[in-house]
Image: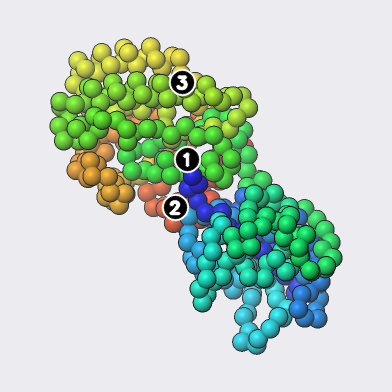
Amino acid sequence: MNYQHQVILSIGSNQGNRLQHIESAIASIHQEVGTVVKVSRLYETPSWGFESEAFYNCALVMHTQRSAHEVLEKVLGVEQKLGRIRSEIQGYQSRVIDIDVIAFDEEIILSDELQVPHPAMQERMFVLVPMRDLNLDWKHPILQKYLPELLRASEDKSNCKVIQKLDAPLAKMHLEQFNYIAIEGNIGAGKTTLTTKIAEDFNAKTVLERFADNPFLPKFYEDQARYAFPLEMSFLADRYQQIADDLAQFDLFKDFIIADYHIFKSLIFAKVTLTEDEYRLYRKLFEIIYKEMPKPDLYVYLYQNTDRLLENIRNRGRSYEQEIPADYLDKINKGYLDYIKSQTDLNILIIDVSERDFVKNQEDYVFILEQIQQKVAT
C-alpha cells in the first residue's frame, strides 16, 4: 500500500523561451507541490485546436500526500508565478505555461473545478506520447485501457518530435550511494513517515519497526516501574530478530535500504527507563547482540523540541501515548544526543525539524533530501 498519491501532470508552453518555462515549472512543482520522481523527454508538438506557434510538451510523475484539489490549487499557483494569465475568452489560446492534472492514482473525480482523468487526454498525442516515456502501469479508470491501448485508439495523428532529454529533480540526488540509511528520532519526531516517503520516492527497501505489536507498551505507559524491564527486553529481542530477518532478504552492497530505527535505540531507552541494576544486566546482553548487527552507512537523527513532539503525539492519537510526560521525552532526547557524541565511527547527520513539517510543506521535505545529499557529496 502506497503512502503517497501518484499524480501525472502534463506541461506545455508555446510562448517565449519554451524550454526555460518548462524547466522552471518542473523545478517549482518539485519544490512547492510534490516530489517529481520521473519526467518524460521534451517534445515539440503542433498547437491543438487553434492556429499558433508549436508547443513544447512533457509529462511527469509526482508523489504527494495532498488531495487532488489541493494539487490543482498548487499547480495553478505555479502557473501564475511563472506568468500565466488566464483569460476570460473561451477556447484554446497561446500560453507561457500550462499545467494539467491528467491523473490522480486511478481515481475518478468529477467536480466543477477538476475532472480526472483529464476528459480529453485520450484525444491528445501531446499528452499520450510523453506519458509513454514514464513507463507507468496505469489504467484509465473510465475507459479501462492501459496507455498503449489509448495510443493505438487515438484519432489524433499529430507529429510529436523529440527535442531533448529532461532531468527529473531526483536524478541529481544519489541517496542510494548510502546502501543502508537509518532514520532516528524521539517519539513523535516523524521518522517512520520520512522513511516511508523517501523509500517510495527513491524505490528503496524498507525496514520498519513493529512497535505497535508490543504487548508491554500500553502497560508500560500505565506503570513504568513494573513493566520497564520486560518492555525493553521484548523490544531488544524483536528488533534483533526483525533486523536479522529483514536485512537477510537484501544485499547490503547493492540494495538501497532505509530503516526507521537503529538497534542502538534499545540501549538509549533502556538507560532512561531501567533501574541501575537492570540496566547493567541489559547492557551486557545488548553488547553481545550489537556486535553482530550491520551498521548503517548514514545515521540521520531528526531533532524536534519537546513541545512539538507532544503536539505530534496528541495529533496522531495513540491512546497509550497521550500521558507521556515532557520530562520523559527530554531524557530520551538527551540519551540520543549523548549517544551521538560518543560515536566516532558512525556517519551521523542531525537535522533540526522543530520548525519544519515535511508532510504538509514540500519545501521542508526537499530541504531534508538536500541535507542528506550533501552528506553523499562529502
Mark 3 belongs to which amino acid? Ala
Which one is nearer the viewer's eye here, 321 or 348?
Answer: 321
Taking the image as shown, residue 313 lies to the left or right of residue 254, namely left
User: Dot 2 lies on which element?
Assistant: loop
Q: Quadrant of residue 188?
A: top left
Which one is nearer the viewer's eye here, 44 or 143?
Answer: 143
Residue 32 higher or lower than 190, as above or below: below
What residue is shown at x 19% (from left), y 43% (from top)?
A: 323
| 1 and 3 marks in contact (CB < 8 Å) | no
What residue is shown at x 29% (from left), y 30% (from top)?
A: 214
- Tell me if I can see residue 206 in this picture: yes
Which one is nearer the viewer's eye here, 377 or 234?
Answer: 234
User: Dot 1 lies on which element?
Assistant: helix
Q: Residues within 10 Å of mark 1 (few under 14, many from 20)?
A: many
- Residue hosting label 2: 359
Q: Residue 195: which numbered mark, if any?
A: 1
Which one is earlier in the sequence, the residue at label 2 or at label 1? 1
User: Dot 3 lies on which element?
Assistant: helix
| 3 and 2 marks in contact (CB < 8 Å) | no
- Residue hosting label 3: 244
